Image (cartoon, rainbow, N blue to C red):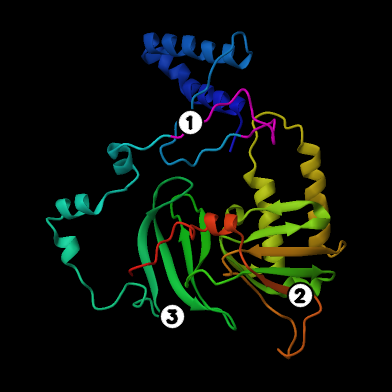
């Protein structure tokens, strides 16, 4: 996450790295780099208008629209269909290509039971992956576990031995529920911080008193407590937002973080709303008797809208004939 100025600043910083040694060993290359860096510096000072083109074959780039909700006249977005070569770069192959590469062996494999059925609750599976921070080879551990009074979930954790980066994620071990679910948790004392919370990757988080609205993908899937969820949101805002140019809303962000710290210290009462259209999130009730209501927790199950079904991919799902 950066700014347009930040992209230029990092490019200049990377090009100027070891420039002194380069001048001594390869003076011609150093001179060309100096000239190119000068052109980049001119772009930062806006001596002439210029165009920045970002092309992402995965479609995971995002550029802020400062004119929102109006259209940004200075930014043009073009969606395109990937070529076969680009799909291969992303690891996407058709079944025919896979069968051709394996001489048909892939289609002949018929295991007696599925891989999910082999994930017994007392077994930890491990597979190779790359660190999301430094891209070094790392191991990801995966385990199927049962949430009391709820359902099974898959917990995945990755630890990078090269840079020490740690990630953990929780994914639902079952399908999408018939209805969405909304939890309203009243946080008026530190006792409410001890609630267990399973937040799926499709669950959004709202705090009306702080004008806070966090999408489901921002924090991902987590099995934590009320306090842990708020701390994760505060940590991501403090350390995840990177800006190479001074932001206009910096004071607002600092003010919001101060209010969030007051909530974590028990000095401010708020209502935490978790809205999961997939119905795969869970909030623990603090009532010892399940038949007695929990005054600090409201649970509402609702019919999903067409837009919510579309976001979950249900509108395009064809089940006839299967």
Name the element at disc 3. Answer: loop
61 or 15: nearer the eye? 61
Task: Tell me which segment is drawn in magenta.
Answer: 64-79
Q: If the image is split into quadrants, where does the C terminus sit?
A: bottom left
Q: Which residue is mark 3?
A: 121
- Image quadrant assignment for residue 141: bottom left
Gap between marks 1 and 2 measured at Cα:
45 Å
Q: Residue at x 58, y 14 (%)?
A: 43
Residue 78 is marked as 1
Tell me if residue 195 comes above or below residue 128 in the rendering: below
Q: If the image is split into quadrants, where does the N terminus sit?
A: top right
164 or 238: nearer the eye? 238
Magenta span main SS: loop
- Image quadrant assignment for residue 269: bottom right
Horizontal side of 108 relative to 14 (left or right) equals left
Horizontal side of 246 relative to 57 (left or right) equals right
Name the element at disc 2. Answer: strand
Q: Is residue 2 magenta?
A: no
Tag 2 or tag 1, which sits nearer the N-term?
1
Q: Residue at x 55, y 72 (%)?
A: 178
Q: Which residue is mark 2?
A: 297
């Amino acid at each position: 996450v950066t700014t347009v100025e930040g992209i230029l600043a990092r490019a200049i910083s990377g090009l100027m790295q070891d420039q002194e040694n380069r001048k001594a060993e390869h003076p011609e290359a150093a001179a060309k780099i100096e000239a190119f860096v000068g052109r980049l510096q001119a772009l930062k000072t806006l001596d002439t208008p210029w165009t920045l083109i970002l092309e992402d074959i995965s479609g995971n780039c995002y550029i802020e629209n400062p004119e929102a909700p109006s259209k940004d006249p200075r930014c043009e977005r073009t969606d395109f269909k990937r070529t076969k070569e680009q799909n291969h770069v992303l690891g996407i192959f058709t079944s025919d290509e896979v069968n051709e590469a394996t001489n048909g062996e892939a289609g002949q494999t018929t295991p007696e039971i599925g891989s999910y059925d082999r994930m017994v609750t007392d077994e930890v599976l491990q597979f190779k992956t790359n660190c999301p921070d430094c891209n070094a080879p790392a191991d990801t551990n995966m385990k199927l576990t049962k949430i009391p009074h709820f359902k099974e979930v898959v917990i995945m954790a990755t630890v990078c031995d090269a840079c020490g980066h740690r990630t953990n994620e929780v994914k639902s071990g079952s399908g999408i529920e018939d209805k969405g679910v909304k939890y309203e948790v009243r946080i008026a004392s530190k006792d409410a911080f001890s609630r267990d919370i399973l937040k799926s990757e499709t669950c959004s988080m709202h705090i009306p008193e702080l004008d806070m609205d966090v999408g489901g993908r921002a924090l991902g899937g987590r099995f934590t407590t009320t306090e842990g969820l708020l701390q994760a949101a505060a940590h991501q805002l403090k350390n995840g937002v990177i800006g190479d140019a001074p932001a206009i809303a910096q004071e607002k962000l600092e003010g919001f973080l101060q209010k969030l710290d007051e909530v974590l210290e028990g000095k401010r009462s708020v209502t935490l709303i978790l809205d999961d259209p997939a119905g795969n999130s869970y909030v623990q009730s603090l009532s010892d008797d399940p038949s007695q209501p929990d005054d600090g927790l409201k649970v509402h199950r609702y019919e999903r809208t067409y837009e919510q079904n579309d976001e979950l991919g249900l509108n395009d799902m064809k089940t006839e004939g299967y």
